[in-house]
Image: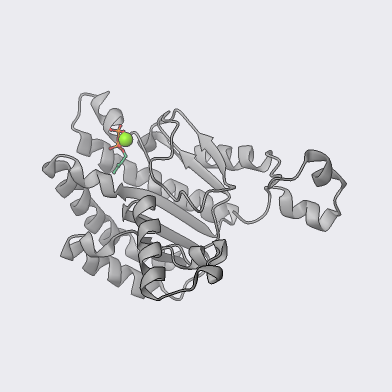
Amino acid sequence: MDGNGRWAQSQGRERIFGHLNGVEAVRASLKAATACGVKYLTLYAFSTENWNRPKDEVEALMTLLVHTIMSELDELDKNEVRLSTIGDFDSLPENCKVELRKGMERTAHHSRINLILALSYSSRREITEAVRKMVSENISPEKISPDLISQYLGTAGIPDPGLLIRTSGEIRISNFLLWQIAYAELYFTETLWPDFGEEDFFAAILDYQNRERRFGLTSAQISSSEPSSHEKTKSGGAL
Ligand code: IPE
Ligand code: MG
């Protein structure tokens, strides 16, 4: 979710005004994702590196997070959204942790869509933590496999993303789900996050559905395969 600061500054406003307006884009994307049958929507809301922003901006973002969870929780519950987080949960301010825990407990039984907030998240840190944990459990080297590594990440149990969207014209990954996006389709748009609406989300999904996902195979292999396995390589399935 990138471009909040530039969106605000282009109107001569403070950066936080952009963050405030970014909440509407979160609502729109969640609504559009739910309508499309997306089962997992992960939002990169705050990176480990974002802690180094000016103190005022960090505080404002954390306050916005608390207020948004408080004000949206009824709606999330009503829409059967299951809320969870990835990232360094312990590093968040106490009031954020309290509201997030409340939100996660209240929505734990839902399964229409999983809304995963990446908070104080860094992929390299997540991988480092996973290695640390594996070593501390004395896992023998021959047992280490890609699947096992996945199970030690914060995203354990969550399928790898099919599609990654980045707004605001920046064409980079910025330490997000590096392991998990091995075969994700990447979608970049110039639209700044506060302007990103339902139509923009649908446009990204349409683009994704027209991609041929080969997973290392050749195009001929994909088109000559049985309809059932062919379907697996088309993007139209679960994201
Ligand atoms: C993304 O918008 C929101 C967060 C990182 C929390 P930015 O704040 O990065 O906006 P730009 O990139 O400065 O425009
Ligand atoms: Mg940015």
Total marks shown come to 0
Q: Residue at x 39, y 34 (%)?
A: 195
Query: Is 36 displayed left or right of 11 in the figure?
Result: right
Q: Residue furthest front?
A: 141
Query: Is the image coloured rainbow, by chain, by secondary structure, or in one colour?
Result: one colour
Q: Is residue 121 left or right of residue 233?
A: left
Horizontal and vertical percent for residue 129?
35, 62
Q: Residue at x 59, y 53 (%)?
A: 239
Lateral position of residue 126 relative to residue 235, left or right: left
Q: Pinpoint residue 179: horizontal percent, then vertical percent.
A: 49, 52
Q: Measuring 76% from the left and 53% from the top, which residue is drawn there?
A: 231
Ligand 2's quadrant? top left
Q: Quadrant of residue 20?
A: top left
Would you place residue 197 above or below residue 190 in this image?
Answer: below
Foreground residue, 181 or 204? 181
The quadrant in which the N terminus is found is top left
- From the viewer's side, name the closer residue of 172 and 60: 172
Q: Is residue 77 above or below residue 164?
A: below
Corner quadrant of residue 16? top left
Outermost residue to the left: 56
- Considering depth in this image, is 115 or 54 the residue closer to the camera? 54
Q: Quadrant of residue 39?
A: bottom right
- Residue 204, x across and y down, in percent: 56, 39
The location of residue 167, given as percent across then percent down, is 43, 35
Give above or below for 34 relative to 23: below
